[in-house]
Image (cartoon, rainbow, N blue to C red):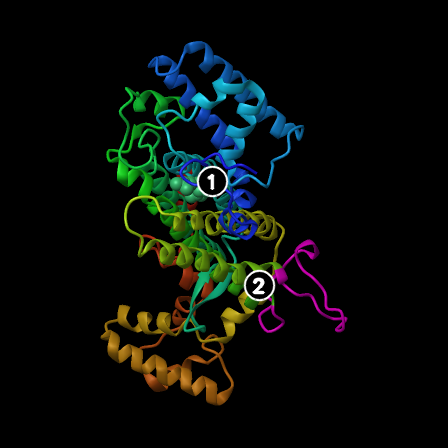
Amino acid sequence: MAKMWAGRTDGTTDQIADDFNSSIHFDCRLFEEDITGSIAHASMLKKQAIIPGEAADHIIEELKVILSDLKSGKLEIDLSCEDIHMFVEQVLTERIGDEGKMLHTARSRNDQVALDMRMYMRKKGNEIIALIKELIEVLNESAEKYTDVIMPGYTHLQRAQPVFFAQHLLAYEMMLLRDVSRLEDALERMDESPIGACALAGTTYDTDRMYEAELLGFSGISANSMDAVSDRDFCLEFLSCFSILMMHLSRFSEELLLWTSWEFRFVELSDSYTTGSSIMPQKKNSDMAELVRGKTGRVYGDLVSLLTVMKGIPLAYNKDMQEDKEPVFDAIDTVIMCLKVFTPMIATMKVNSDNMHQAAREGFINATDLADYMVKKGLPFRSAYKISGLIVAECIRSGQVLETLPLDEYKKYWDQFEEDLYEAIDLKNAADTRTSKGGTSRASIREQIELVKKKLG
Ligand code: ARG
């Protein structure tokens, strides 16, 4: 097929070169942004009298028809075109003739693609923010529901101190809230229209970039034409945000995998989000959580891939930059899919409070509270720590736990122990008296739940 850019060359590229060069297989998903951008461009050209008003009207009218034809499936994307920009222009010109050829005045595919990508990412960024917020809401409801459930909090995956399950859930809520705010920051920084930068140097036509930007919902325009067409830092910012988000979901998945194991049995996932084994009849596998963990690697790969593409290319546009799309699209699709499965998986998960409590009882996780008890009675912390450790060792030797060791045994280690020590080491009490700001006390948990509600708006 004759190339739109035939002229300097005869445009008769080899088929293999065409296939290699073409991006329509993946940039076809930008059709709506591309056409919306072109409609705004034609409006600007008309307002500035750069092209005849009548021609602009015809262009706009037909672009709207093309958009609805594509949406309804009446018009199919011609995959033999080089990219989506060429395809739209080709259909327009086929349909309205020479007037269609006026659309590309004071514009280049370089600023066009930079615009399309920003618009697409704005749409998807907002969609992802809404999905993260849904997940936070589900977690916050669970935190409210499980405020009284005691579990062991871990460090080094060893039982450390008693916490309420809600405190654990709220930790993830805080991480996810930051993921939302990171994406919002990226959206704000990206809120500059590159269109009008043209190929790289701007244009001699009397364009109105701000007018075009406003039509497209941007609050500003890029200040430098070469920057506008050269950088993909906005894509990289999104990929970084996605990577951090996936890292959070992956850690959560890892915990779900531990918690659903027979060794922990802290939670049970709904049958709708688990699978069986083709050979072992007893199995209930948490494949969804494993896949979220696995797909995290894939999203990191998307980030590293684009960072590597960008690191060595001179200003301004280079075809290397066409390689931005597949990683960005892949990361967006992956993140959306993960969130869509993760949220209902959490919403339907059953919490096994008894097992959590039992695990908390067995691990001497109130040994710090025993030490704190002695400190409150006047002993320096380091000495109290030592005594508490010796008592734990004694319990392990004699097959006891701190709650069951008799008072006279305690007194062998420190003569000021009294009956009230049992209250101090009671697990629920130990958690509930951690009233420092952000701590695991139920008062603090209620504060955190309210904070999240306020942030979700
Ligand atoms: N398909 C191209 C891309 O995705 C569009 C821009 C092409 N520009 C050019 N000068 N060849 O980057």
> What are the residue bounds of the magenta stretch?
261-287
Query: Quarter for ligand 1?
Result: top left
**Callout 1 crowding tier (Cα within 10 Å): few <14, some 14–19, many ≥20:** few
Residue under label 2: 290
**Callout 2 crowding tier (Cα within 10 Å): few <14, some 14–19, many ≥20:** some
Towards the viewer: 442 or 227: 227
Residue under label 1: 10
Q: In the displayed orientation, state which residue is furthest to the top.
A: 54
In the image, the residue with mark 1 has its CB under 8 Å from the nearest atom of ligand 1: no
The image shows residue 62 at horizontal and vertical percentages of 55, 19
Q: Viewer-nearest of labels 2 and 1? A: 1
Q: Indicate which disc residue 280 carries.
A: none
Q: Amino acid at mark 1?
A: Asp
Task: Classify residue 451 as left or right of residue 148.
Answer: left
Q: Amino acid at mark 2?
A: Glu
Q: Is residue 104 visible?
A: yes
Residue drawn at point x = 40 percent, y = 48 percent? 319
